[in-house]
């Protein structure tokens, strides 16, 4: 999978370490992020995080002992170091942390958080007036870790992360961490203004691309809903389509949404599935199409499939995605079934 570019945002090297003021290292089974000042930190789904100067990621036998040991080794107060679990595997002891805490090996950090998933990272750069800001991140076994150098308080970071993660992870199955060094010397963003929305778009764009890159050779199934009056409805419809069996049958794809009352009052403009192998139209102006099953099967075998639903009531949209392998595993089948 290749990253998808958006106007005003460019991809840069460095991934999770691309943001100014962030240092990243890793040992064999744990990773460290270190800043020269406290980091604003937020999480989705919500859990309490303080403003750490260092973050230790791994799977630890005793988080309190590990935190105390690491803080001592780094000459930091204990309340300046946050421990998070972003991987599986055998638990790491405080002795292991003491022996190999600071090795400055960025690639090792990726290996720790990725586990059995592909080691994937990316970073985007955008402008606030004369200042260039960055958001970097990596795809982890349990979730996503993002870093930025934009100066934004934690409550606005939380809003930006909530909006992006809620749109991309409707089940809340992935944990998302966002850390800000505030290292770029622009005037701080203190309200939901034009600069805040540019930043929030950057968070969404980066997560969007990390999902794509993380799918790797497994391929991707994308769900795109456009034309709803409210954003919440677009998200709900996307989630309903994603829960439905992946089959080239318009009735099957929409029955969950209809059963939940999500299509009440909505006019179906079109429903189709596209891939690099072609396109099949399932419904047009509320009328379901008769399918050519051979052509439909070919389209569904594409590496990157898009399920596109357009309704006619407004201008809101939503996008969600799941790896093709995971979708097939959820259905306990090895290929899409045409009904």
Image (cartoon, grey):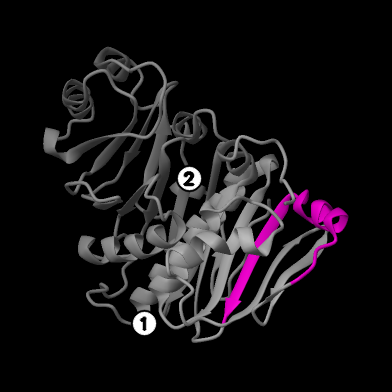
Residue 4 falls in image quadrant: bottom right
Q: Residue lying furthest top in this view?
A: 95
Q: Which mark is residue 271?
A: none
Region rendered in magenta: 289-311
Along the polypeptide, which appears first: circle 2 or circle 1?
2
Task: Give the camera-side residue of 64 and 37.
Answer: 64
Residue sitting at 17 percent across and 34 percent down? Answer: 76
Q: Is 205 situated left or right of 25 in this image?
A: right
147 w.r.t. 67: above or below: below
Q: Is 177 situated left or right of 48 in this image?
A: right
Residue sitting at 48 percent across and 36 percent down? Answer: 106
Residue sitting at 38 percent across and 16 percent down? Answer: 90
128 w.r.t. 63: above or below: below
Q: Is 123 situated left or right of 32 in this image?
A: right
Confirm whether residue 256 shows in the render. yes
Task: Give the camera-side residue of 229 and 189.
Answer: 229
Residue 80 falls in image quadrant: top left
Mark 2, secondary structure of its residue: strand
Question: Where in the figure is residue 298, as x and y percent of width and height?
Answer: 83, 52
Q: Which mark is residue 194?
A: 1
- Residue at the disc numbered 2: 138
Question: Where in the figure is residue 243, as x and y percent of width and height?
Answer: 51, 52
305 magenta-colored: yes
């Amino acid at each position: 999978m290749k990253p998808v570019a958006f106007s005003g945002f460019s991809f840069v090297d460095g991934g999770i370490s691309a943001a100014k003021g962030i240092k990243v290292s890793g040992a064999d089974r744990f990773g460290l992020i270190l800043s020269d000042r406290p980091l604003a930190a937020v999480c989705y789904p919500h859990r309490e995080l303080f403003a750490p100067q260092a973050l230790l990621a791994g799977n630890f036998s005793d988080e309190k002992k590990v935190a105390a040991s690491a803080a001592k080794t780094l000459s930091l107060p204990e309340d300046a170091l946050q421990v998070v679990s972003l991987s599986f595997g055998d638990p790491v002891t405080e002795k292991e942390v003491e022996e190999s805490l600071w090795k400055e090996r960025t690639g090792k950090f990726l290996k720790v958080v990725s586990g059995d998933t592909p080691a994937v990272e990316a970073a985007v750069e955008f402008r606030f007036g004369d200042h260039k800001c960055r958001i970097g991140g990596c795809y982890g076994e349990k979730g996503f870790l993002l870093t930025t150098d934009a100066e934004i308080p934690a409550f606005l970071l939380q809003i930006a992360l909530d909006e992006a993660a809620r749109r991309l992870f409707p089940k809340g199955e992935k944990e998302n961490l966002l850390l800000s060094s505030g290292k770029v010397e622009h005037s701080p963003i203190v309200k939901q203004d034009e600069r805040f929305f540019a930043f929030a778009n950057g968070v969404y764009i980066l997560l969007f691309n990390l999902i794509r890159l993380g799918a790797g050779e497994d391929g991707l199934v994308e769900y795109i809903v456009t034309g709803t009056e409210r954003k919440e409805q677009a998200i709900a419809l996307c989630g309903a389509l994603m829960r439905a069996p992946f089959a080239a049958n318009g009735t099957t794809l929409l029955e969950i949404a209809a059963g939940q009352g999500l299509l009440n009052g909505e006019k179906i403009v079109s429903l189709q599935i596209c891939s690099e192998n072609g396109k099949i139209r399932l419904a047009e102006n509320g009328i379901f199409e008769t399918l050519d099953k051979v052509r439909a099967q070919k389209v569904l075998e594409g590496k990157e499939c898009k399920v596109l639903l357009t309704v006619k009531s407004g201008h809101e949209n939503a996008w969600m995605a799941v790896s093709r392998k995971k979708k097939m595993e959820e259905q306990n089948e090895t290929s899409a079934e045409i009904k």
